[in-house]
Image (cartoon, rainbow, N blue to C red):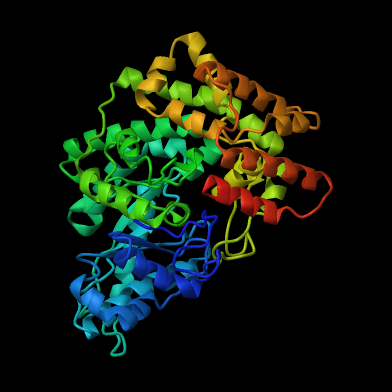
């Protein structure tokens, strides 16, 4: 599934600039299908401006293609709805009306109907939220007026893809699914044919750190396997994954190891950096591997004692990670304002959009958060992880972590090549929280038995840029150009 996550640093191969406006996203969607061979495209209404005439644009300009590859049968356009708990409810209603009007247009031109029948509901914490969205859509389809000829073509029921976005919710998401199945049967007199639980990878990392996030996902995947068997329903998990290890670590060069790491996933998100910061031929090759191998991977089973121990370890790592992030939040948020924009987001947080939070502090969204840390030469993968590993060594639980986080050493070694110790020492002189990060660096080096330092020419150039960025910040001078150049070198903004 291609997504519109704005994490790319370079100019997309089909475009004239790094910034992709809402008017350009229909072209991007079509090329994801026709050029890259991607099966599904996420049309994102959450927190960003969106072209509401997407079906008219796709079918009006590329009708021949969609006659051969019908939407809803061969290619899939999946709306990510706004969450009415955090965004204004009128955006939710506009998205749902878009699904109904898309069905009418598809029928008018003789294509498969309905072309859109699934939606992603973000920030799900309860089964009731899923049922509420389905009920709202059902009521819309019951509108009765000669001008609204919905009965002839509209989907009568909307399939909800629940998106789980923090570690506690992810771990317990099987309970939400079970409750949803009960409520669905009561309300709609039937059970769904399948569910596609969608696990976030970026936001839980921002909230809890990299190790707790990966462990939580492994617990969820094991539970989904058991839930599917016990409830006689097919579950097809989705995972959001970006290019830098902190947000997923997926690049066109590590497709096979990613599939092994997240065995049991049936759909993977391919974000903008994956598609535009790497050679196009490698991107297409990787997509073919996913199409060929992803469906056959099976999640590993997990015994209850292991699960309990892993949940304890999540708390251990979070206890190192969260206080450090809270202590440097203001500084990071300031840097994030200089991360170059790549998409048209809805502005005015608190009116139309929202921010993220750890503890009592507000943070930028995950891409800006990750980009800000990398721009300082402080990969967030390291924060809390070194001290957490040291604690796990002492209590003998490190082998259990390594059993379930297969790529732990590879991810830390990759992130470690962007560490700038000189910057960290300067930062520590101003705020003691950075001394904890220096302790993380030492502990990770001890664990990996390597020095965290640049190796390639590009990584050494990146280190130089991060030194210049910190110098500019100290002089209160602009850094956006340096941030952009550093993002190109590491093949992702954040």
Q: Which of 351 and 366 is in front in this view?
A: 366
- Looking at the picture, does residue 230 appear above or below residue 80? above
Direction bottom: furthest residue? 146
In the image: residue 170, left or right of residue 159: right
Direction left: furthest residue? 232
In the image: residue 121, left or right of residue 371: left
In the image: residue 389, left or right of residue 35: right
Relative image position of residue 382 (x, y in whole percent): 57, 30
Q: Residue at x 31, y 89 (%)?
A: 147
Relative image position of residue 154 (x, y in whole percent): 25, 75
Query: Which quarter of the figure is the N terminus placed in?
Result: bottom left
Q: Nearer the viewer, residue 164 or 335?
A: 335
In the image: residue 219, left or right of residue 202: left
Count of numbered tags: 0
- Looking at the picture, does residue 45 appear above or below residue 295? below
Q: Nearer the viewer, residue 264 or 15?
A: 15
Direction right: furthest residue? 475
Q: Residue at x 43, y 51 (%)?
A: 274
Q: Residue at x 46, y 45 (%)?
A: 243
Residue 142 in view in this figure: no
- Looking at the picture, does residue 312 appear above or below residue 170? above
Q: Which residue is drawn at 45% across and 25% down?
A: 409
Direction front: furthest residue? 457
Residue 42 in view in this figure: yes
Relative image position of residue 467 (x, y in whole percent): 72, 40
Relative image position of residue 355 (x, y in whole percent): 60, 52
């Amino acid at each position: 599934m291609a997504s519109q996550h704005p994490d790319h640093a370079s100019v997309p191969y089909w475009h004239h600039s790094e910034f992709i406006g809402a008017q350009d996203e229909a072209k991007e969607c079509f090329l994801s299908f026709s050029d890259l061979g991607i099966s599904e495209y996420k049309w994102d209404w959450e927190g960003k401006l969106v072209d509401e005439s997407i079906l008219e644009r796709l079918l009006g300009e590329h009708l021949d293609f969609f006659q051969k590859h019908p939407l809803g049968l061969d290619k899939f356009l999946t709306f990510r709805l706004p969450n009415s708990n955090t965004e204004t409810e009128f955006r939710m209603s506009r998205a749902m009306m878009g699904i109904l009007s898309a069905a009418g247009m598809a029928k008018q031109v003789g294509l498969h109907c309905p072309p859109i029948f699934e939606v992603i509901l973000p920030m799900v914490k309860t089964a009731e939220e899923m049922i509420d969205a389905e009920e709202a859509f059902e009521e819309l389809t019951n509108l009765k007026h000669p001008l609204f000829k919905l009965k002839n073509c509209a989907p009568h029921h909307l399939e909800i893809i629940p998106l789980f976005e923090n570690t506690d919710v992810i771990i317990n998401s099987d309970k939400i699914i079970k409750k949803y199945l009960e409520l669905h049967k009561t309300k709609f007199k039937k059970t769904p044919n399948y569910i596609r639980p969608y696990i976030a990878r970026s936001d839980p990392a921002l909230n809890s750190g990299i190790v707790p996030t990966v462990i939580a996902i492994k617990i969820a995947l094991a539970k989904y396997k058991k839930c599917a068997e016990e409830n006689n329903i097919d579950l097809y998990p989705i995972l959001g994954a970006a290019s830098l290890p902190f947000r997923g670590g997926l690049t066109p060069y590590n497709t096979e190891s990613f599939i092994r790491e997240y065995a049991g996933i049936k759909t993977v998100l391919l974000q903008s950096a994956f598609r535009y910061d790497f050679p196009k031929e490698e991107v297409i090759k990787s997509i073919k591997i996913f199409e060929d191998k992803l469906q056959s991977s099976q999640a590993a089973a997990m015994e209850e004692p292991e699960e309990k121990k892993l949940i304890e370890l999540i708390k251990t790592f979070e206890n190192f990670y969260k206080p450090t992030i809270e202590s440097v939040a203001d500084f990071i948020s300031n840097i994030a304002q200089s991360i170059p924009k790549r998409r048209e987001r809805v502005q005015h947080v608190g009116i139309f959009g929202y921010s993220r939070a750890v503890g009592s502090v507000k943070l930028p969204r995950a891409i800006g958060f990750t980009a800000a840390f990398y721009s300082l030469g402080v990969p967030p993968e390291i924060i809390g992880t070194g001290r957490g590993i040291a604690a796990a060594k002492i209590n003998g639980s490190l082998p259990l972590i390594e059993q379930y986080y297969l790529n732990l050493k590879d991810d830390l070694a990759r992130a470690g090549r962007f560490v700038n110790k000189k910057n960290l020492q300067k930062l520590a002189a101003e705020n003691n929280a950075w001394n904890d990060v220096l302790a993380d660096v030492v502990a990770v080096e001890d664990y990996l038995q390597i020095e965290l330092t640049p190796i390639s020419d590009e990584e050494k150039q990146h280190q130089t840029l991060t030194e210049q960025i910190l110098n500019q910040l100290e002089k209160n001078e602009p850094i956006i150009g340096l941030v952009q150049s550093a993002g190109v070198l590491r093949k992702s903004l954040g």
